[in-house]
């Protein structure tokens, strides 16, 4: 490929290569996450299918990225005053905030991997809306990986979870195991309660 990747023949059979293919998968993943896991937001996310070079240009990570969630906030301040005979009064300051949400996904991923990456990035979107005070990468990435593993299982792709369980990366691998073990001991509602305490402490 132009971005330097090699796609093996088996992988290319199910590769997501078009925006229509991507959106069909994304809509299905969002529905399953909402219906089966209760994980969803009403954010109007703009999804983009991009190559490796573009994805790397957007990412601050040194790791090989397959997807990226990006939330852009713009704050606009306007000051208005009334004037009579040169005297100003009634000064008003209006501040408006606009939010834009983007998910960039690597093109030509095999469908089962594309599903996993989509779930991972949507989990970031959910966490930022529900618990914006949590910024520890081990928690945010661990949560995203754990959610993706649940989606893998729902799609019958549990074999993909082996990578997460054995990942030695201190953020993604350790984060996944930390979240997974926490849920085993405290259930998912216990995890949400824990997230709430972390979020409160950061405010």
Image (tube, rainbow, N blue to C red):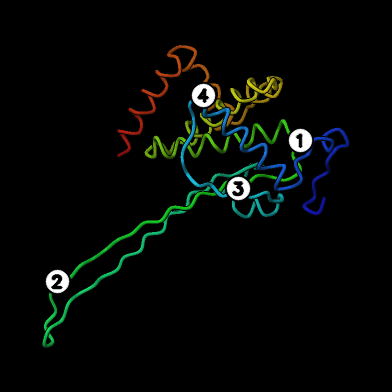
The crowding category of the residue bearing disc 4, from other C-alpha atoms within 10 Å (few below 14, some 14 to 19, many at least 20), is few
Q: Which residue is mark 4?
A: 37
As drawn, the label of residue 110 is 1
As drawn, the label of residue 23 is none
Res. 174 image quadrant: top right
Res. 134 image quadrant: top left
| Towards the viewer: 113 or 60 | 113
Q: Residue 183: x and y, percent?
A: 48, 17
> Which tag, 2 or 4, sits closer to the chain's start?
4
Residue beneath the point at 70% across and 48% down: 19
Res. 162 image quadrant: top right
| Towards the viewer: 148 or 98 | 98
Q: Residue 180: x and y, percent?
A: 53, 19
Q: Residue furthest top?
A: 185
> Which tag, 1 or 4, sits closer to the chain's start?
4
**Mark pair 1, 3: CA separation:** 17 Å
**Mark pair 1, 2: CA separation:** 60 Å
Residue beneath the point at 70% across and 24% down: 160
Which quarter of the rendering shows the C terminus?
Answer: top left
Q: Which is more foreground, mark 1 or mark 4? A: 4
As drawn, the label of residue 90 is 2
As drawn, the label of residue 47 is 3
Residue beneath the point at 49% across and 29% down: 39
Q: Residue furthest bottom?
A: 85
The crowding category of the residue bearing disc 1, from other C-alpha atoms within 10 Å (few below 14, some 14 to 19, many at least 20), is some
Looking at the rendered structure, the secondary structure element under dot 2 is strand
**Mark pair 3, 2: CA separation:** 44 Å
> Which tag, 1 or 3, sits closer to the chain's start?
3
């Amino acid at each position: 490929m132009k971005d330097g990747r090699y796609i093996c023949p088996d992988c290319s059979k199910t590769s997501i290569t078009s925006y229509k293919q991507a959106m069909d998968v994304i809509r299905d993943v969002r529905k399953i996450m909402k219906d089966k896991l209760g994980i969803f937001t009403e954010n109007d996310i703009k999804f983009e299918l991009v190559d490796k070079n573009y994805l790397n240009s957007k990412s601050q990570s040194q790791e090989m990225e397959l997807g990226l969630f990006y939330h852009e906030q713009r704050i606009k301040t306007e000051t208005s005053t009334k004037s009579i005979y040169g005297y100003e009064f009634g000064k008003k300051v209006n501040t408006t905030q606009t939010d834009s949400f983007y998910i960039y996904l690597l093109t030509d991923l095999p469908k089962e991997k594309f599903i996993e990456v989509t779930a991972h990035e949507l989990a970031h979107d959910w966490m930022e809306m529900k618990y914006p005070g949590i910024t520890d990468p081990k928690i945010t990435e661990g949560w995203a990986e754990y959610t993706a593993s649940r989606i893998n299982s729902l799609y019958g792709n549990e074999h993909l979870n082996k990578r997460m369980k054995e990942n030695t990366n201190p953020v993604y691998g350790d984060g996944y195991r930390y979240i997974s073990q926490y849920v085993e001991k405290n259930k998912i509602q216990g995890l949400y309660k824990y997230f709430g305490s972390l979020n409160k402490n950061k405010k």
